[in-house]
């Protein structure tokens, strides 16, 4: 199609009319029919499908945009890209910090009304409430057996992991633990809370 389009435009630019002999037209039709029926083995001929829109990149058919916003790999890619732009070493995933993040996300879900009513920081846990695993993120890191020191925690209510991380990076105080040169590990968890998600990330250093 592209070649035909360019030929037509070239002829029009020269002020010429395109005329084809009957023999040439018949040959062109036969060649087009052969191409249309050729499948290249088992591969489907996308251009022969009337529903295929060539103006839409074919990669969109196999790429899920959610894959760029959700999950461990997408989250680490985003964080480490931001850290690289600040000349910081990349962070790696830590399973113990993931457990700490999950336990605190569960605590928030179980006690959100009590937390809001108390006016206490969402990063502090009350041992009288269900799901308590430690008053601070430091003690919660110790509770799950993290080998280093849990040095920070961030919480958000966003639909995706990367969306949460972006909100932290764009917030003055929330970005500090994520852009700390001493941080080497992260752990993240999210849980559904009504119509939104609660996102929790723990960050840690070796000492």
Image (spheres, grey):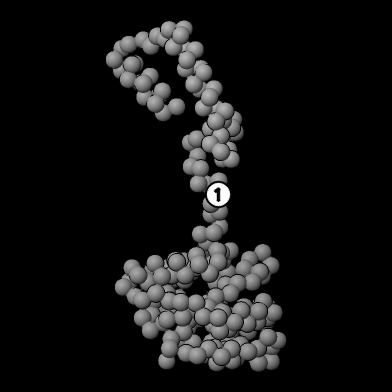
The residue shown at (39%, 67%) is: 81
- Residue 116 lies, with reference to residue 28, above or below; the image says below
The answer to which quarter of the image holds residue 5 is: top left
Q: Position of residue 25 (x, y in %)?
A: 47, 12
Q: Is residue 100 left or right of residue 186?
A: right
Q: Position of residue 46 (x, y in %)?
A: 55, 36
- Residue 131 lies, with reference to residue 7, above or below; the image says below
Task: Evaluate whether residue 204 shows in this view.
Answer: yes
Q: Is residue 10 left or right of residue 138?
A: left
The residue shown at (45%, 27%) is: 1
Q: Position of residue 66 (x, y in %)?
A: 56, 57
Q: Position of residue 75 (x, y in %)?
A: 49, 68
**Which of 5 and 69 lies nearest the eye of the viewer?**
5
- Residue at the top extreme, as displayed: 22
Residue that mark 1 sits on: 62
Task: Evaluate whether residue 173 shows in this view.
Answer: no
- Mark 1: few/some/many CA within 10 Å (<14, 14-19, 20+): few
The answer to which quarter of the image holds residue 119 is: bottom right
**Which of 197 and 92 lies nearest the eye of the viewer?**
92
Q: Is residue 85 left or right of residue 144?
A: left
- Residue at the front extreme, as displayed: 41
- Residue 134 lies, with reference to residue 165, above or below; the image says below
- Residue at the left extreme, as displayed: 14
The residue shown at (66%, 79%) is: 106
The C terminus lies in which quarter of the figure? bottom left
The residue shown at (46%, 80%) is: 185
């Amino acid at each position: 199609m592209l070649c035909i389009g360019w030929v037509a435009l070239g002829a029009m630019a020269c002020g010429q009319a395109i005329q084809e002999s009957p023999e040439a037209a018949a040959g062109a039709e036969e060649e087009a029919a052969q191409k249309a029926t050729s499948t290249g083995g088992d591969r489907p001929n996308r251009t022969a499908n009337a529903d295929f829109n060539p103006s839409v990149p074919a990669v969109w058919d196999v790429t899920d945009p959610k894959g760029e916003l959700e999950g461990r790999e997408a989250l680490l890619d985003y964080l480490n890209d931001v850290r690289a732009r600040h000349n910081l070493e990349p962070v790696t995933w830590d399973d113990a910090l993931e457990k700490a993040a999950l336990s605190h996300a569960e605590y928030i879900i179980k006690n959100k009304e009590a937390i809001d009513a108390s006016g206490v920081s969402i990063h502090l846990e009350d041992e009288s409430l269900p799901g308590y695993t430690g008053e601070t993120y430091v003690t919660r890191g110790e509770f799950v057996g993290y080998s280093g020191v849990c040095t920070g925690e961030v919480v958000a209510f966003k639909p995706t992991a990367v969306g949460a991380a972006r909100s932290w990076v764009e917030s003055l105080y929330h970005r500090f633990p994520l852009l700390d040169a001493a941080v080497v590990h992260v752990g993240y968890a999210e849980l559904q809370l009504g119509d939104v998600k609660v996102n929790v990330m723990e960050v840690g250093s070796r000492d």
